[in-house]
Amino acid sequence: MQHTHISAKHRLLDLHLKEVWQYRGLIWLFTKRSFVVAYTQTILGPLWLVIAPLLTSVVHVVLFGNIAKLGTDGVPQLLFYLTGNALWGYFSACVTKCSATFTGNAGLFGKVYFPRLVVPLSDVLGNALRFCIQMLPALALLVYYRIHGMLRPRFSAIWIVPALLVLLGLMGMGLGIIISSLTTKYRDLSVLVGFGMSLWMYATPVVYPLSTLSGAIRELVLLNPVTQPMELFRWALLGVGSVSPSRLVYSLWVTVVLVFGGIMVFNRVERTFLDTV
């Protein structure tokens, strides 16, 4: 007979990858649950995944494109904002959802054991699926503008997009589980997450291209680890944007630090968080 021993004593960098893989069915179950809960008792259901970013992009066209007169590197405005909002929304959702891992699942964690990393991983997977759905209108516009010769996407580099989703998903998860671990004691952080992500968006070339910046402001924006993935995303999909290997390596290092630092804090708090939540 096989026995499983569950102990609170483990190394801070213990990833439990084998155990997480054994619970892959639970990851999919949590992912499916997030979709069902989010759109239960709504008239349009999952169509909101398309309508919400589309409306947001239209507002950005009016505010930033027509009123503020911000350039889009020659890309049609609606397509520029749709793609930027979709990628930023994915990263932002990874941070905000993962930041509620402990506080949002305390009741479940107190009743049954499973690897706690299953929850943030399912959040990232669910956000990736939402991103794919939100990109449908953008892809339709991309095909239209490509047929009419208004865009030159780099189709040979499209494979970069899934890699960027993995990069930003891990970066968002790492930061999110750090915040989640801290909010078990400092609940104020959960209030500041939404506000902080809103400010962070304007420090990222989402509603403006990096080419419009210069001097110290440009250097400050380049310190943002999301800047280069955003530019690389547009470079592959829209044929515009700047690519800097050194800046991409910088984003990779930030991701590694956040993931491993987050797991260390996560494993430490996991042992006692039920006493404080």
Image (spheres, helix red, strand yellow):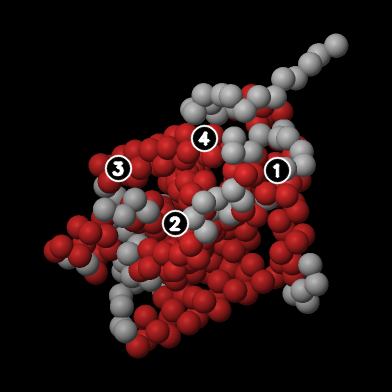
Which residue in the structure is indicated by mark 4? 268
Image quadrant in which you'd find residue 100:
bottom right
Answer with mark 2 or mark 4, whichever residue precedes in sequence: 2
For marks 3 and 1 on the same chain, the one whose residue lies earlier in the sequence? 1
Front position among marks 2 and 4: 4
Q: Which residue is mark 3?
A: 250
Answer with mark 3 or mark 2, whichever residue precedes in sequence: 2
Q: Amino acid at mark 4?
A: Arg
What separation in Å lies between label 2 and label 4 (alpha carbons)?
40 Å
Question: Residue sitting at 34 percent across and 50 percent down?
Answer: 225
Contact (Cβ within 8 Å) of mark 4 with mark 3: no
Disc 3 element: helix
Question: How busy is the neighbourhood of tag 3: few (under 14 within 10 Å), some, or many (20 plus)?
Answer: some
Q: Which residue is mark 1?
A: 109
**Is mark 2 in CB contact (under 8 Å) with mark 4?**
no
Give the amino acid at mark 1.
Answer: Phe
Give the farthest residue toward the top: 1
- Identify which residue, 240 or 227, lies in the foreground: 227
Mark 4 to mark 3 CA distance (whole Å): 27 Å
Secondary structure beneath label 4: helix
Q: What type is the residue that disc 2 sits on?
A: Leu
- Helix, strand or loop under label 2: helix
Measured in 3D between alpha carbons, the distance from the residue under mark 3 to the one under mark 2, in whole angstroms, is 22 Å
Q: Which residue is mark 2?
A: 237
